[in-house]
Amino acid sequence: MRGHIAAILILLVILSAISNVGSGLKGIVVAASIEPLAAIASEICGAMGDVLVLVPEGVEPHAFQLTPDVIKIAESADLIVHTGHMSWEFKLVNVTGKPSVGLDEYLAYGLNLSYIPGTGDLNLHGYWLKVENSIAIARAIAHKLAEIDPGNAEFYMDNLKIFENKVKALKSFIESTVESYGIRGVKVVVTFPAEA
């Protein structure tokens, strides 16, 4: 239950940040495969550039097909941020030759995958909704941006610290709320858009 409430609230924070994404190209450009990753990238990129979302709103990412327009957007980017589990993402990175971060990089920065109950298989879906995983993703993005744009490395690292503090404060708030309402262990059913 604790994880579900945390996932819901972190999703709300991430989605609220999307309004800052893609506001007119300037500085560094990041192309993100889905909106939640774009929101995290936007927190790190800040005023130094723009973050563009590759999968249009309302499109199920697993069914998405690359188009010439999407390839053109990705080719204009300095960095591609992706989930690391959809074949079109790998194709896009290969076609453009652009630097990228995905699941392997997130794992290197501490991302933890859950198992699908009853199967023993790793769950590659929605891992960015876990509080700790959003921090691992942000770390991978910040370090790659610092490598690509070393003149602004300190800016990206400062934004990473701010993001980590916001996420940790949110987690603390969630935990105290769960305790104060006595809802630890309560089971809920949550639905959300496919691109979450």
Image (cartoon, rainbow, N blue to C red):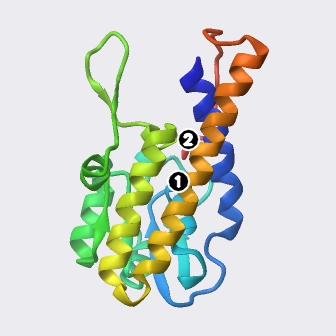
For residue 84, side relative to residue 167 (left or right)? left
Under mark 1, the amino acid is Glu
Residue 49: quadrant of the picture: bottom right
Residue 46: quadrant of the picture: bottom right
x then y, percent, for residue 115: 33, 22
Residue under the image location 44 percent in, 58 percent down: 138
Assign the N terminus to one quadrant of the image.
top right
Q: Secondary structure at mark 1?
A: helix
x then y, percent, for residue 32: 46, 64
Q: Is 177 located above or below residue 89 in the figure?
A: above
Q: Nearer the viewer, residue 80 or 174?
A: 174
Q: Is 160 located above or below residue 130 in the figure?
A: below
Q: Nearer the viewer, residue 73 or 118?
A: 118
Q: Residue furthest right?
A: 181
Which badge, 1 or 2, comes first in the chain's sequence? 1
Under mark 2, the amino acid is Ala
Q: Residues within 10 Å of mark 2 (few under 14, many from 20)?
A: few
Assign the C terminus to one quadrant of the image.
top right
Disc 1 to disc 2, how far (Cα)? 26 Å
Q: Nearer the viewer, residue 84 or 183?
A: 183
Q: Which residue is mark 2?
A: 194
Residue under the image location 60 percent in, 37 percent down: 171
x then y, percent, for residue 33: 44, 60
Q: Which residue is mark 1?
A: 164
